[in-house]
DNA sequence: TTGAAAGCGGTACCAA
DNA sequence: TTGGTACCGCTTTCAA
């Protein structure tokens, strides 16, 4: 089953391949009579341009590599939607590679992307990732990359991140305004930058009110949250809760249900990326991080970089964008 | 920034491109001394084979198109995981195209896939899709495709679907075994095949017990479920609930919370694809549809088709697989 | 306005 | 064991 090529059309019409090629893309040089003939033949014989040959020729794949730490329920769909909306409208495709929270996989995926000649990379890093050593090659090869959400301290690539400080502070304010006096704040993995930055500003804010008692815990998964909160609630009571993420909220919620505290007058504030949680309990208050916005913004930044020729690239610290 | 090519290496080493090409892929004809030289040079000059040139030459993209009706929170992540696990291990990539529940988009995506020369297609259809007219071209071009989850009656392509009948029946049995007498069953869009098949077997089972009162409603979104259930609960009470999907469950859950029924002794059974809902309320019972399993199974089927040469393709009704 | 031809980076056949 | 070369399908420069 051979697919019709430009050469086939050229032979059938007794004209040259260059003429066919130009006619097909409505080049001004070509007479309209020829254009019509060519288009008809193309239509009739079901001609489909071979993207490979084109990409190969043009040295541009129109493909972006999306590397994510994991394919999670909470965040990815909205991110993907945001990315799709921008990339598809610009004629780009993207493929997803999941690192499964392993630095080694992440490193390998970068190689994969380089080998398959992606035009650019969108990456969110694993919890294990500590530096951007494995991204250096991208700079050498001048493959633009934008880091989003999960990142490390660096100034080589543009990054798009949520404003943790702002979100954590506002969450604290919400609890304060509700008059909460005994607050349990639940954070994720203590080693993550994101945890530290949310912790810091949350704590700072709360500490401006010496009368408030703050208890903080760190848990690496929803299940751990649940266990820890369960045992805490056996001995203490709280009138306010803070969960730094959707995942910590899942654990907290589960525990509150178990302890029959879900209908009491406690206040729960959470920094969230999802849209599902609104069904958990409509009384929870969300400081929403918008995945769609992040995805589309990161993709836009990447498209911008792609449009710059390499000579445009100013060798200075890349910008970080806060959403 | 030019990337090193085989030609570059050949010139540097004063040997032919064919020799370099063969040395690089460890061809038995090549002497080990040459192989070593070539590999060293490749290493030194950071040689990366150009997949485009290779694909172009070999007429195989190693890319699969994944077309989904929407990028939803509930199901997609696990599906993607399942697909990834199979495809990546076979050296394939895939890109995601979302139809946003529009038949027109779906049709266009098929074209896109054909144009970008994907080796195969995995597709889950929109609610609007009524036939496989738009897939006919795939057959002509001998592009293998596997339909999963959302499909229509057809026997041209292999399909992988959940066993709705089994799931609905088992869900009904669960409620019956709990001794529920007044059951509210919540279904999705009445026009969908999936709804009809779940409805039918659920109802059949329940009707074997004439003493049970069954009330069924159809709602197109979680929010609609919530509204409808809210007003129903004002006038009636139920001791058992059935939700045909994660989404209907979300609405139901929300409503139960609002009516303070979440800690009563009602029974809730749901056919679910997600993993999130376990945190909603651990007393809910799930008849789980495993997205990971579906994704990996569909991908495996596709890989199988890919391995067959076109002459292997037997022209007979394609099989459906039930999970 | 059209055509001839080179070439993108590999691969593989045929010859040496 | 190695080299020469045609070719995959398309674009683009140069010439006519």
Image (cartoon, coloured by chain):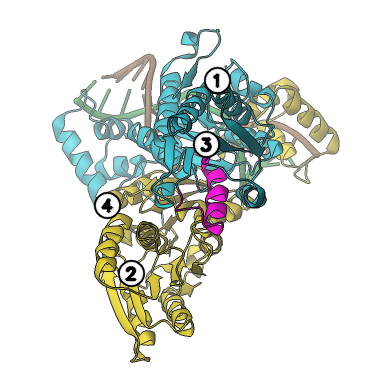
Chain colours: A yellow, B cyan, C brown, D green
Q: Secondary structure at mark 3?
A: strand
The part of the chain drawn in magenta is: B239-264
- Asked if A13 appears above or below A18 in the picture, the reply is above
Separation of residues labelled 3 and 1 (CA atoms):
42 Å
Percent from the top left, x then y, of residue B18?
32, 30
Distance of label 3 from label 4 (alpha carbons): 25 Å
Residue that mark 1 sits on: B208
Seen in the image, is B89 located left or right of residue A296? left
| Callout 1: SS | loop
For disc 2, the marked residue is A186
How far apart marks 2 and 4 lie (CA) works out to 25 Å
Task: Give the vertical position of B318 relative to A72 (above or below).
Answer: above
Mark 3: give few (<14), some (14-19) or many (20+) Cα within 10 Å. many
Q: What residue is shown with label 4? A: A102
Instruction: Kindly tell me whether residue A160 is visible in this rendering.
Output: no
Q: Position of residue A23 (x, y in %)?
A: 74, 37
Name the residue nearer the viewer: B256 or A275. B256
**Letter of the chain that mark 3 sits on in the rendering:** B
Q: Nearer the viewer, mark 2 or mark 3?
A: 2
Residue at point 21% right, 23% down? B29
Can residue B243 be found in the magenta stretch? Answer: yes
Nearer the observer: mark 4 or 1; the answer is 1
Q: Is residue B96 magenta?
A: no
How far separated are the C-alphas under marks 2 and 1?
49 Å
Q: Is residue A48 left or right of residue A207?
A: right
The CA distance from mark 2 to mark 3 is: 38 Å
Residue at 20%, 23% in the rendered image? B28
**Label 4, label 1: how many angstroms apart (C-alpha)?**
52 Å
Q: Chain of mark 2?
A: A
Give residue B66's mark: 3
Looking at the figure, which quarter contains the N terminus of chain A? top right
């Amino acid at each position: 089953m051979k697919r019709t090529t430009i050469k086939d059309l050229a032979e059938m019409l007794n004209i040259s391949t260059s003429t066919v090629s130009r006619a097909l893309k409505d080049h001004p040089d070509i007479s309209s009579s020829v254009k019509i003939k060519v288009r008809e033949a193309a239509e009739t014989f079901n001609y489909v341009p071979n993207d490979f040959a084109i990409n190969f020729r043009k040295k541009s794949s129109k493909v972006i590599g999306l590397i994510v730490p994991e394919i999670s329920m909470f965040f990815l769909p909205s991110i993907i939607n945001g990315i799709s909306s921008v990339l598809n409208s610009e004629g780009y495709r993207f493929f997803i590679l999941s690192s499964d929270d392993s630095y080694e996989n992440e490193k390998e995926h970068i190689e994969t992307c380089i080998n398959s000649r992606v035009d650019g990379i969108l990456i969110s890093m694993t919890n294990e990732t500590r530096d951007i050593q494995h991204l250096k090659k991208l700079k050498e090869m001048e493959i633009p990359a934008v880091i989003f959400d999960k990142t490390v301290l660096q100034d080589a690539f543009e990054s798009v991140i949520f404003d943790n400080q702002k979100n954590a502070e506002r969450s604290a304010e919400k609890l304060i305004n509700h008059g909460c006096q005994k607050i349990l704040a639940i954070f994720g993995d203590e080693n993550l930058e994101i945890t530290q930055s949310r912790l810091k500003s949350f704590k700072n804010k709360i500490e401006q009110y010496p009368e408030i008692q703050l208890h903080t815990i760190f848990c690496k998964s929803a299940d751990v949250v649940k266990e820890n909160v369960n045992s805490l609630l056996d001995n203490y009571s709280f009138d306010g809760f803070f969960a730094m993420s959707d995942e910590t909220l899942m654990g907290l919620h589960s525990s509150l249900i178990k302890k029959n505290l879900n209908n009491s007058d406690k206040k729960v504030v959470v920094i969230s990326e999802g849209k599902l949680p609104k069904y958990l309990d409509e009384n929870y208050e969300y400081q929403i991080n918008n995945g769609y916005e992040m995805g589309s913004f990161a993709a836009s930044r990447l498209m911008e970089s792609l449009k710059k020729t390499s000579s445009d690239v100013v060798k200075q610290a890349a910008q970080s964008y806060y959403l």
